[in-house]
Amino acid sequence: MKLDPQQQVLLLELATMQRLHESSGKAPESPEQAELTKATNALARQRSATHAAQRAVDDMEREILRIQADETRLRSRIADNKKQLMVATDPNTRKDLNKDLYTTKSRLNDLLSELAEAHNEIHALRNNLDLANQRLADAEQAFDVAQAAKDAAPAAPTAADREHRMAEIRQSLPADIIAAYDAQRNENSVGVAAFNGRSCGGCFIILPAGDIAAIRGAAADELPQCPDCGSYLVRT
């Protein structure tokens, strides 16, 4: 089948569009939409990570406040024990007061160790939160860039747009070419496919060297056929 090389491109567009239209009816996802989807997912993950980092800081701050409140009560209890010891004369009373004073001081020492550990931990948690906030800012910026690119990209063609374009191409090509295309498409559901130099875009078979040479060597206005599936091949 012979056809002007420029019209071959139109015929390939028709075949590709028709396969897409009849298979799913949906155009493939644009690079801009794919990047926006990636950025949206990354932003959602980073927001979750940042919220978790903030909760960890909040929880540790509450823990520090609890320890500090316990410290205040223990110091008050120690002061009260010392005050009572200054006036108590009963041996049993003094014994109980001294025992309680010792126990309270031990508990206070343990508490101060907990407080020191908590301060060390919250320092690390705040550093982690700062890093999470920076990553969130980066993710938000990446999302804004992807959204702007998506908004600036041309709208994907609708099914109606594709039908109009296919009708337009059919009218622009010779009737005998369209008839040959339709006949071949009825046989293999492809009709016309791209040839990338090694394989057929209809059956995706890598062809033998002899067939590749024959296809490459065909005249520019010739549409050779795939020896495997029979599709007319447009050399790209």
Image (cartoon, helix red, strand yellow):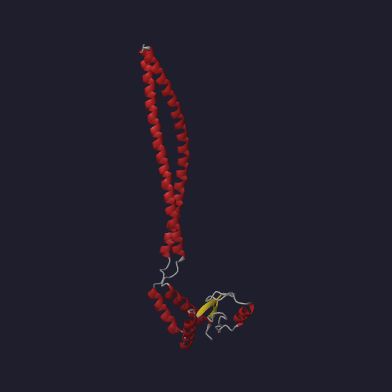
Furthest residue to the front? 92
Furthest residue to the bottom? 176
The answer to which quarter of the image holds residue 66 is top left
Point 42% across, 54% down: residue: 44
Residue 140 in sight in this render? no
Image location of residue 51, percent across then percent down:
41, 47
- 87 with respect to 6 (left or right): left
Point 47% across, 34% down: residue: 117
Name the residue nearer the viewer: 139 or 195.
195
Image location of residue 140, percent across then percent down:
43, 53
Furthest residue to the right? 210
- In the rendered view, tell whether residue 144 sits above or below residue 234: above
Point 64% across, 77% down: residue: 209
Residue 23 in sight in this render? yes
| Total count of labels | 0
Image location of residue 107, percent across then percent down:
43, 26
- 94 with respect to 199 (left or right): left
Image location of residue 220, percent across then percent down:
57, 82
Query: Which quadrant is the C terminus positioned in?
Result: bottom right
Furthest residue to the top? 89
- 86 with respect to 222 (left or right): left
- In the rendered view, tell whether residue 109 sits above or below residue 59: above
- In the rendered view, tell whether residue 83 sits above or below residue 163: above
Name the residue nearer the viewer: 7 or 162.
162
